[in-house]
Image: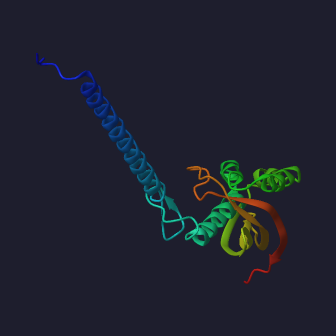
Amino acid sequence: MKTPYKDIKTILKLNRFIVLAVVICAFLSSAFSIWIAYSTNKKVLNSAFAINTDGSVIPLKLITQKENFEVEAMAHLQLFHQYFYNIDASNYESNLEKALWLGNSSVDNIYRQKKADGVYNRLLQYSLVQKVLSIDSKVQQSGNNYSFVTTSIFEINRGTVIDTYELVTSGNLIIVDRNFPNNPHGLLIINYFEKTLKKINNED
């Protein structure tokens, strides 16, 4: 006598086939999702920031840091020297705080030495204005090592007298994580050193 029920083995084989098909589809779907997520993340990381023509960083698009390293290095050094040397009684604390984000302990050591020598006290006592006139940096690469030499021209306004100076500084640059707005270029000054400081005779 025939029964309307299929053979139990046939049913089990069919169930096993369905389960296996579902597992394979789920695996392929997961693999595809992971690949899409990785691809999208990579594109986002490489298009998160933009570098303006003046070296400023806009958080929109980034091609690669290597391609833009020279532009960013110049902008980083420009920013640091402006903060560290373009100071007066009203802004020196905030400017120096910003400058210290752009360098390591070698910058902090020079800051502490200047403070111990009374540089900032004289700034307050005599209401001096130290204004940076120009900053010229040269960056050299040797393997993974980046070194720089920067020549800054600045003047100190003492009220009735304005003296102009030329300062030559040097150091190295290393790549670090970007930190908006404290360190937008993702670079850090190390081995910072004030090489020479000389007074420039002002022309009448």
Q: Is residue 140 above or below residue 9?
A: below
Q: Nearer the viewer, residue 87 or 70?
A: 70
Q: How is colour applied across the structure in the image?
A: rainbow
Tell how many labels.
0
| Res 74 quadrant in image | bottom right
Q: Seen in the image, is 167 located left or right of residue 34? A: right
Q: Nearer the viewer, residue 177 or 109?
A: 177
Residue at coordinates 68% horizontally, 68% vertically from top-left?
132
Extreme residue in the front direction: 1
Where does the image place residue 135, in percent across and percent down from the top left? 67, 72
Q: Is residue 17 above or below residue 122?
A: above
Where does the image place residue 145, in percent across and percent down from the top left? 74, 68
Residue at coordinates 81% horizontally, 50% vertically from top-left?
121
Q: Quadrant of the C terminus?
A: bottom right
Where does the image place residue 187, in percent across and percent down from the top left? 65, 59
Q: Seen in the image, is 150 located left or right of residue 118? A: left
| Res 164 quadrant in image | bottom right
Q: Quadrant of the N terminus?
A: top left
Q: Nearer the viewer, residue 179 or 98?
A: 179
Extreme residue in the right direction: 117
Q: Seen in the image, is 120 located left or right of residue 29? A: right
Residue at coordinates 44% horizontally, 59% vertically from top-left?
47
Extreme residue in the bottom direction: 203
Where does the image place residue 68, in percent across and percent down from the top left? 55, 69
